Image (tube, coloured by chain):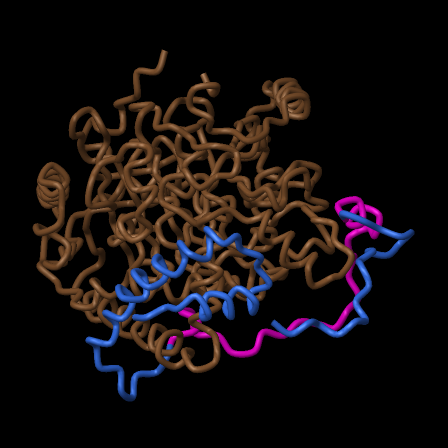
Amino acid sequence: MDARVHAFLSVDKSSALEAARRWDARRADADALPPLAGLPIAIKDIICAQGLPTTCGSRILEGWRSPYDATVITRLREAGAIVIGKTNLDEFAMGSSTENSAFGPTRNPWDLARVPGGSSGGSAAAVSADMVPLALGTDTGGSVRLPAAFTGIVGLKPTYSRVSRYGLVAFASSLDQIGPLARTVADAALLLQVIAGRDPRDSTSADLPVPDYSASLPDGVKGMKIGIPREAIGAGLQREVNDAVLAAARVLEQAGASLIEVSLPTIEYAVPTYYILAPSEASANLARYDGVKYGLRVRTPDIHAMYARTRGEGFGTEVKRRIMLGTYALSAGFYEGFFLKAQQVRTLVRKDFTVAFGSVDLVLMPVAPTVAFKLGEKAHDPLQMYLTDIYTIPVNLAGLPGISVPCGSADGLPIGLQLIGKPFDEATVLRAAHTYEQSTEWHKARPELT
Amino acid sequence: MSITPSIVNHVARLARLELSPEERERLVHELAAILDHLAKLNELSTAGVEPTSHVIPMTNVFRDDTVGRSLPREAVLEGAPERDGEFFKVPPIIETEPES
């Protein structure tokens, strides 16, 4: 099946089978098994797992094998999960369609002519097509939530710093966050439970207790206040998406929540803010790919030419575009007008959410303005591609937890509902998402891939 | 926003990125279009607004100054494009960089 979807870049078949046999042998001892015992999990190929390739979807790291486990991988192994392979992505997680992979695109299991969303498109497609029950993605501007919406599964971006980034190859360090992809909210909660929490190896990881996410799922939404931003509904939104999201809000209302209109006036400035901050951080983070310590080296007699040619040949079009954009924004004479300005607008975006959360427990809006688009449809228009993330990017800028849960369908393609919570309040996000999911049938729909 | 070929050349040089003539040509137009969109931020007044560099309030994070385990040297050098014993090997670095 993966020959047509192309969710995986590498599969670790022999180790996975061996681990599966080990867990099978312990099945009789069910009470003593760890929470994810024997469960296969797919890992976005930007997270390091010892001995396995980590390409980041880039020629510049082709063939490189990670000498260590990321903290999330260590925790998954301790919990009994089996890492079965690494999944496709937009190169260095830069993209919204998984078309920017140097190793070819991933296709949407619902319609092979369409994109699965990105950048964690391989992880989302693998879960959607029932290749694995669980996967990890990363979300810098929507890269877990968007592919979850486009492929009809659940994707959660935790609060920034909730999950350790140690062993996650850095794209934009102030925004990057690892998150679970799963078929149901309960599964996503189980996976978050395993990976969340303080890690001494990531000094930015939050030193806060991790609540029992699964335990509070059945508590419902009675008395919960849910805000709907007036700027996020109506204009610019595919009609079916608009209708499905509003219908989902009413389902939560019937379950006992109250709906309140809120305002996020700076939401329309989030995309330009992001496309200054993320490329700027990326241009610094990707300086390390210089042909010296790992990956590709283009051999030249002098070192300056080696740096430039290695990077020129190793990076793809979108990565080069963002390195150029970021370098420009940080260069002398432009720093204050671009980078500093964007950091100030980021403060305004955060403030909008803080004000909204003064009167509500959750914010509800679409994940994406449309359902999955066709391969090639936006590939030659970077700006149109960037605007796909108009509803997900504000959440990264503010560092908040957000989930995508299936809430409808248009032309046979899934639609995602986004629920956004207060910092470190993943429990409320999961609880509302679970309540919604269990009141509807959308999460049961599966693509007919035969 | 006007982006000239010489700006693209300058930025590519800062980024240590070799670009083909076609890539340079395309970037002149693409960067101009993207920067035009980014200029939308100028509609907002940000006088006196504190910049956000990190969303989670955090001051210095300390740890005990104890020696921990490092990655085995051999495991790391295995990924190197070129090595000389226990060192990364690179082309000569002493010459001064040519001006462009």
Which one of the lettered chains is coloured blue? B
Horizontal side of residue B22 vs A238, given as left or right? right
Single out the residue that lies furthest toward the top. A450
Q: Nearer the viewer, residue A132 or A288?
A: A288
Q: Is residue A355 visible?
A: yes
Q: Position of residue A109 (x, y in %)?
A: 35, 24
Q: Is residue A251 visible?
A: no
Q: Nearer the viewer, residue B73 or A166?
A: B73
Indicate the quadrant containing the N terminus of chain A: top left, top right, bottom left or bottom right: top left
Residue at point 42% right, 69% down? Answer: B56
Single out the residue that lies furthest toward the bottom. B48
Indicate the quadrant containing the C terminus of chain A: top left, top right, bottom left or bottom right: top left
Reply above or below: A331 against A163. Answer: below
Residue at point 61% right, 18% down? Answer: A24
Q: Colour of chain A?
A: brown
Q: Nearer the viewer, residue A440 or A384?
A: A384
Q: Nearer the viewer, residue A182 or B11?
A: B11
Q: Position of residue A274 (x, y in %)?
A: 35, 62
Q: Is most of the magenta stretch helix, strand or loop?
A: loop
Residue at point 65% right, 52% down? Answer: A310
Reply above or below: A164 against A22. Answer: below
Horizontal side of residue A40 vs A361, given as left or right? right
Q: Position of residue A189 (x, y in %)?
A: 40, 41
| Residue A175 image-quadrant placement | bottom left
Residue A109 highlighted magenta (yes or no): no
Region rendered in magenta:
B52-80
Q: Position of residue A299 (x, y in %)?
A: 74, 50
